[in-house]
Amino acid sequence: MSAAHRGCNSFFSILVCSCSAGSQILALLLVLLIVSYSSAEQSNQRSRSERHLDPSDFLWPNDAKMALSLTFDDGRSSQVTDGVPVLDSFDVKVTFYAQPENLVEELELWRKAVASGHEFGNHTIGHPCTGNFAWVRYDNVALESYDLDRIRTEVLQANDKIEELLGVRPVSFAYPCGQTYVGRGINTKSYVPLIAELFQTGRRWLDETSNAPDHFDPAQVMAMRMDGEDFSTIRRRMERTKRNGNWLVLAGHGVGDSTRWGTDLGMLRELLAYVQEPSNGVWTAPVSEVASFIRSEQAIGK
């Protein structure tokens, strides 16, 4: 082997050494281009990953790493007969978004839940959702047939009735089915501005992320599913929320139900035990309390 080829052991060296003198410059440029592309691609991979982990500098109470709000929709009886005793045993307060008519059957228990510190929000009178659900068409509460005047009237009726039944006037609202519009086609209107006018918060549903305290919209609070989930799934969501320093809102329906619209009692107990351990860094409070805390901290920072 000639002296010129003794150093040609690597792929790139062989590529350069095997070329004529005139072509070696082009080969070297090709090598540099490949190396540069590889470095840039690795950098892009890191930046894509890091974009999803942008820790805020927001300070939660008790040096917590995140905030958590547990919420339950509709005012179902299992929430107060099965859920509230477990919640109270861990001294965790949550937000119940109720349809007034659903409160009547267990009214005395619901009144006790109010007295123990749980928050009650508005979930409308008729639970209007898209008419693509057959039951919605049957009940004549398809959002496509609504206008802003009708939704305003029914939301205020629900507030009046909840206040009559429980003695508290809701300051929080949950959009039925997580849907925030009325009408159809070019006549579609968002009723988010209406909720922003009437309430401190409006909670969505089936979202894919938590709430960044320096960016979230109080009239469109993101909420993730709690029904049908096991504790390991919920814990992964909390760990991700901690890394971002965000506010996680979980939404459920029945308590103890085995259906996809129920929050498992065993999972709920595991979750409550976890958040009660200070070393886990979770501050738990009802929706309006967390939103009020964020607003107060933002005001201080101005």
Image (cartoon, rainbow, N blue to C red):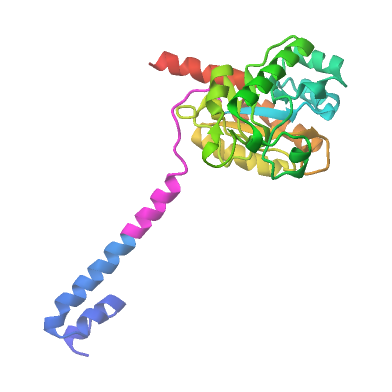
Q: Quadrant of the N terminus?
A: bottom left
The residue at the far bottom in this view is: 1
User: Whole-percent x and y of residue 172?
Assistant: 63, 21
Asked if the stretch drawn in magenta spans residue 58, the answer is: yes
- Seen at 23% across and 72% down, the residue is 30
- Seen at 70% across and 38% down, the residue is 226
User: Whole-percent x and y of residue 46?
Assistant: 40, 51
User: Whole-percent x and y of residue 150?
Assistant: 64, 25
Residue 65 in view of the camera: no
Q: Quadrant of residue 149?
A: top right
- Seen at 61% across and 34% down, the residue is 223
In the displayed structure, 250 sits above or below 101; it is below
- Seen at 78% across and 35% down, the residue is 139
User: Whole-percent x and y of residue 204?
Assistant: 61, 33
Q: Quadrant of residue 225?
A: top right
Residue 76 in view of the camera: yes
Horizontal placement of 208 versus 14: left or right? right
Q: Quadrant of residue 157?
A: top right
Asked if the stretch drawn in magenta spans residue 76, the answer is: no
Q: Which span is picked out in magenta? A: 40-66
